[in-house]
Amino acid sequence: MKSTMMSVPLSLNTLFERSGKLFPQSEIVSRLPDKSLRRHTYGQYYQRTRALAATLKKLGLRKGDRVATLCWNHHAHLECYFGIPAAGGVMHTLNLRLSPDEIGWIAHHAQDRFLIVDDILLPLYQQFAKHHAFERVIVFPFSGAPVATRDGDPHAGEPAVDDYEQLLADAPDHFEYVEHDENDPVAMCYTSGTTGRPKGVAYSHRSTVIHSLVQSMPDCMALAGRDVVLPVTPMFHANSWGVPYSAVMVGAKFVFPGPHLHPEDLLDLMQLEPPTLSLGVPTIWLALIQLYEANPGKWTLPAGMRSLVGGAAVPEALIRQFAKHGMSIAQGWGMTETSPLASLFYEKPSLIGKISEDEWFARRATGGVIVPLVQLRIIGEDGKACDWNGKDVGELQARGPYITGAYHEVEQDPDKFTDDGWLRTGDVAAIDSEGFVRIADRTKDLIKSGGEWISSVDLENAIMAHPAVAEAAVIAVAHPKWTERPLACVVLKPGARVDAQTLREFIAPKFARWQLPDVIEFIDAIPRTSTGKFWKLKLRERYVDWSWPTQSGA
Ligand code: ADP
């Protein structure tokens, strides 16, 4: 017997069409470089996005061609999210925080044909232009200044330069979506490449639609049309965790911060346009809440705002601090390779009324519950799958309809994918019987001491619970006797004081003696990666020649 259902391809275009028609009054607010706010309705967004798609077709974009974006978070970037695939193209978000050489290498590897760039980022483009010849550079006049357009010279490898707004104004009236299969690509992102060269992941209509549906479910992000979404996560970081797609799908209001991501700017923006849902990596919220508490009465936090925080371990202390101010943090785990949401905290009914408040906070400090359609497994050192008992740790592997099965133009590598088709995440984790995923570490960040593993995440969490501590990162440092020992780098809050011995005593009850860091270094700042996470690689480099006092190591 056959199913009687229609075989209609899943399509971003269908989501977009419905939103444009059903939610024309929904708003998109963008903060401009001069900090003023620009407002669009979904009605305008719909027209502009279709105009972008029609223009790209007119300019000769072919199916599957890559269109790179080098943009902050704003309405025109959102237009690219739907407009480029509508024209049959593949949006490739370039990470503007990488070095110019890296950006150029990535654009070249992806064979990007066109570039859409914020005018204020043109100086950055100039620095990597030598690595890759785009055919067209479309400049978005984000600052409001006029764009100097130019006809290109293909013989001299000089791209044509267009004004984004002018192109939209001159767009053909008639537009038809490019036919596609649901497995055709719509967007691509490169991993940050902390180990080896960055690698490209290409998302399809199908994977993006399924991810959007799963993400917005009530027991997931509970994303709804009445939400006001503040995506602090850059739109080049795993597509701002896929939220631009799902928020358009439900017709939610957007508040885009533009280039203004400092805590004081975010707090100011929250006064003007209070969000109900915000997303960002933990370092953003650590800095924001500390600034907020240091300036009583200056700002009001949006009552009841929920924050989706992930990309790195979220300290329990931060979750408690937010709760004190009436805001909830839901931690999620994912990777560029997993679209990215693979697990997310929610208040699981099976635990309601059964566990204490402290236990809830401990659950919130995990990577959350595996979301529908994602399969996760933990493979122990013996190569066998571990039980879901919350204790047995091993390599976290993933499989599912929105998890990448390969990297763009890279030979299949057994270090990245198993023979039976699972993604090897490079994370070490345990899963408990309720499906909560506890990330112990990235494989490369685990500390191997005397044959036993120590989780740097657990140590960081404990240290960051001390009221004098602003930030902490724990790294493995080579040790002649124990292979490696933990070294903690701690940044204190302004004006706060605590010594290493007091900190060690503060965390001691939570750990075996041999797990405690032998050395606590007080430093000015923890280096950040291009996506704003603690950059432990840089710290390891700093301490590579460290010589331990002879009695160190428990
Ligand atoms: P990058 O390598 O630039 O950080 P991704 O953003 O794709 O690229 O990062 C994915 C990685 O981030 C995961 O493999 C994991 O190590 C880490 N990560 C993501 N979410 C969490 C979390 N909730 N807790 C701990 N680590 C996390």
Image (spheres, rainbow, N blue to C red):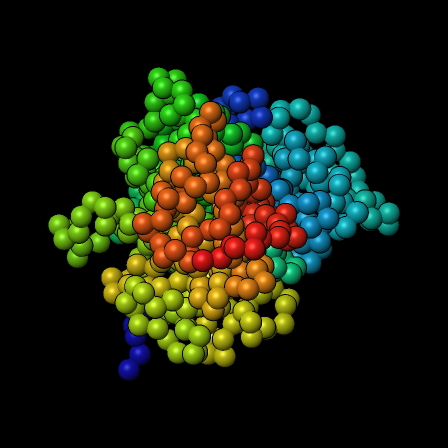
Farthest residue toward the front?
A: 551
* Left or right placement of residue 229 versus residue 238 in this view: left
x and y, in percent, of residue 403 in the image: 46, 63
Nearest the camera: 387 or 37?
387
Vertically, is 507 above or below 452?
above
Q: Is residue 222 left or right of residue 234?
A: left
Position of residue 219 in the picture relative to residue 272 (left or right): left
Front-most of residues 380 and 239 = 380
- Is residue 337 in sight in this rendering? no
Q: Nearer the viewer, residue 503 or 304?
A: 503
Quadrant occupied by the C terminus: bottom left
Image quadrant containing the N terminus: bottom left
Q: Position of residue 362 (x, y in %)?
A: 28, 50
Q: Please provide percent x and percent y for residue 537.
A: 59, 52
Closer to us: 182 or 210: 210
Residue sitting at 77 percent across and 50 percent down? Answer: 131
Q: Residue furthest top?
A: 297
The residue sitting at 58% across, 45% down in the picture is 530
What residue do we see at 34% from left, 68% from top?
A: 392
User: Is residue 276 visible from the viewing direction of this image?
Assistant: yes
| 240, above or below 139, in the image | below
Q: From this viewpoint, which residue is outermost toward the bottom?
A: 1
Residue 269, picture quadrant: top left
